[in-house]
């Protein structure tokens, strides 16, 4: 295909801009010295060891290796400089002992979800959602949000559908929306994690904590939480008698979320919660959720009860709604991510990101010793003059400069340089 020199320059500029958007960070420092932090982790399949590497090492040390992105993991220290990975770390020169504090789940074997299906980004067709607690990834079909795709024709488009713990999207126009969509909730916690955390079991199935359940094993799955109907429910019954706590009158409608609760009511409830720490303001236990977890505890091998698995989807503002009484607060404090959003480390911004080739060249010259910089400028000027001489006949004859013409010039230039050396 014929193209002008301006077209070639514009194409190069577009490539530079795309590279800047894809990799805006500077990947020149391994995160090992930062200790255990929440950061993006990568699994190197070529190294064939169940360990993780940081973003910088994935680019600088394992560039030509096959990798799988595991996405953020908390309290993780890069394994690249340690003896656990045979590949030498090019960023952290000191050999380190194996990390003793890192926890390696099934993701470090390239396996995900409760179905333990190996992950292949080239063939995976389902949307996957990350659990807030264990940070594993789950297929929507394994969360009972939709039927699994049966064929290539009706399955999801691919790896681009993988979602973080902030949502799940409609995977394909040919599939119906999942029971719980990205607009319905903020984060997912899988049933195994809910079963281990007291405060999550306490809130499962209540207002703002969605579950997916069914009436019996032959019934369809449906979305369930205790959003109040238009008439008063048992947790906001105005006829409930007030309760005296430390000479303070507190009605049940103030102790529990109500269907018509305003921002002012919520602020008042929180103030009461802070001052009366001995009073539990958690909503009444959802009996369906309680039955699901009791069924699972009686049979540890049962992943899915007849009514549901026990996964929960927390809606927007969920951190503000926890009860912080003396009974509930310890369970929250054991898992700080339930109280405050975690910081996830990102490499520093690359100061060269987005610069043109000319700007990058000038910056590189400024970093060189003066004598080498002068030699570089002289070589650039010589190349420019030779290129202008080569292109002059094209301009005089009105010919279009094609990519093959430009390639031929540089091939000749490199050949002449090798001949001189």
Image (cartoon, grey):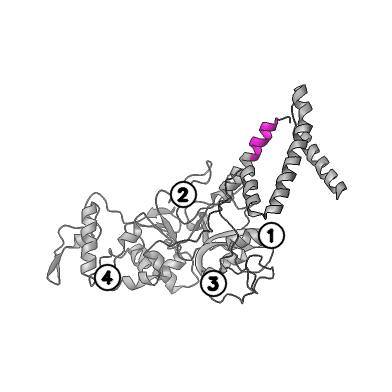
In the picture as drawn, the residue positioned furthest to the top comes out as: 397
Mark 2 is surrounded, within 10 Å at the Cα level, by few (under 14), some (14 to 19) or many (20 or more) other residues, namely some
Number of the label disc, if any, that sits on residue 225: none
Q: Between disc 2 and disc 1, whose residue precedes?
A: 1
**Vertical placement of 282 versus 20: above or below?**
below
Q: Which quadrant of the structure image shows residue 202? A: bottom left
- Dot 1 crowding, Cα within 10 Å, few <14, some 14–19, many 20+: few
Q: Nearer the viewer, mark 2 or mark 1?
A: 1
Which residue does the image show at 44% across and 59% down from the upper left?
Answer: 188
Per the model, the C-alpha gap separating discs 3 and 2 is 32 Å
Q: Is residue 370 magenta?
A: no
- Distance of mark 3 from mark 1, alpha carbons? 23 Å
User: Which residue is located at x 66 percent, y 65 percent?
Assistant: 90
Q: Which circle, 2 or 4, is nearer the viewer?
A: 4
Q: Does the magenta-highlighted stretch encompass residue 7?
A: yes
Q: Where does residue 160 sit, x and y in percent of width and height? A: 56, 49
The label shown at residue 103 is 3
**CB under 8 Å between discs 3 and 1:** no
Q: How busy is the neighbourhood of tag 4: few (under 14 within 10 Å), some, or many (20 plus)? A: some
User: In the rendered image, which residue does mark 2 sit on?
Assistant: 178
Quadrant in the picture for residue 98: bottom right
Magenta-highlighted residues: 1-12
Residue under circle 4?
Answer: 325
Classify residue 9 as left or right of residue 131. right
Q: Would you say the residues marked 2 and 4 are in contact, meaning their CB atoms lie under 8 Å apart?
A: no
């Amino acid at each position: 295909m014929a193209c002008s020199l301006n077209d070639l320059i514009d194409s190069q500029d577009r490539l530079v801009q795309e590279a800047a958007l894809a990799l805006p960070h500077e990947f020149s420092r391994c995160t090992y010295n930062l200790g255990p932090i929440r950061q993006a982790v990568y699994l190197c399949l070529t190294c064939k060891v169940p360990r993780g590497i940081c973003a910088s090492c994935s680019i600088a040390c394992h560039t030509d290796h096959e990798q799988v992105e595991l996405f953020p993991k908390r309290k993780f220290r890069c394994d690249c400089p340690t003896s656990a990975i045979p590949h030498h770390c090019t960023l952290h020169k000191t050999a380190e002992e194996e990390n003793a504090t890192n926890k390696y789940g099934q993701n470090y074997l390239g396996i995900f979800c409760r179905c333990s299906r190996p992950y292949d980004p080239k063939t995976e067709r389902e949307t996957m959602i990350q659990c807030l607690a264990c940070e594993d990834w789950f297929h929507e079909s394994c969360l009972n949000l939709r039927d699994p795709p049966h064929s290539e024709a009706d399955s999801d488009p691919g790896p681009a559908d993988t979602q973080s713990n902030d949502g799940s999207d409609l995977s394909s126009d040919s599939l119906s929306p999942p029971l719980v969509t990205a607009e319905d909730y903020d984060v997912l916690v899988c049933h195994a994690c809910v079963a281990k955390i007291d405060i999550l079991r306490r809130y499962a199935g209540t207002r703002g904590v969605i579950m997916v359940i069914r009436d019996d094993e032959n019934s369809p799955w449906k979305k369930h939480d205790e959003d109040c109907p238009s008439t008063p429910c048992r947790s906001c019954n105005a006829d409930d008698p007030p309760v005296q706590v430390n000479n303070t009158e507190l009605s049940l409608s103030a102790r529990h979320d109500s269907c018509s609760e305003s921002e002012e009511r919520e602020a008042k409830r929180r103030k009461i919660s802070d001052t009366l720490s001995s009073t539990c303001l958690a909503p009444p236990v959802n009996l369906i959720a309680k039955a699901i977890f009791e069924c699972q505890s009686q049979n540890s091998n049962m992943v899915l009860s007849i009514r549901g698995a026990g996964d929960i989807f927390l809606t927007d503002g969920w951190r503000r709604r926890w009860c912080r009484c003396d009974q509930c607060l310890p369970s929250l404090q054991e898992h700080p991510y339930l109280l405050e959003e975690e910081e996830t480390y990102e490499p520093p911004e690359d100061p060269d990101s987005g610069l043109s080739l000319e700007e990058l060249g000038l910056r590189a010259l400024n970093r060189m010793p003066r004598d080498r910089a002068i030699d570089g400028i002289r070589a650039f000027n010589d190349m420019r003059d030779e290129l202008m001489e080569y292109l002059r006949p094209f301009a005089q004859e009105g010919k279009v400069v094609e990519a093959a013409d430009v390639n031929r010039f540089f091939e000749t230039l490199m050949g002449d340089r090798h001949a001189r050396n």
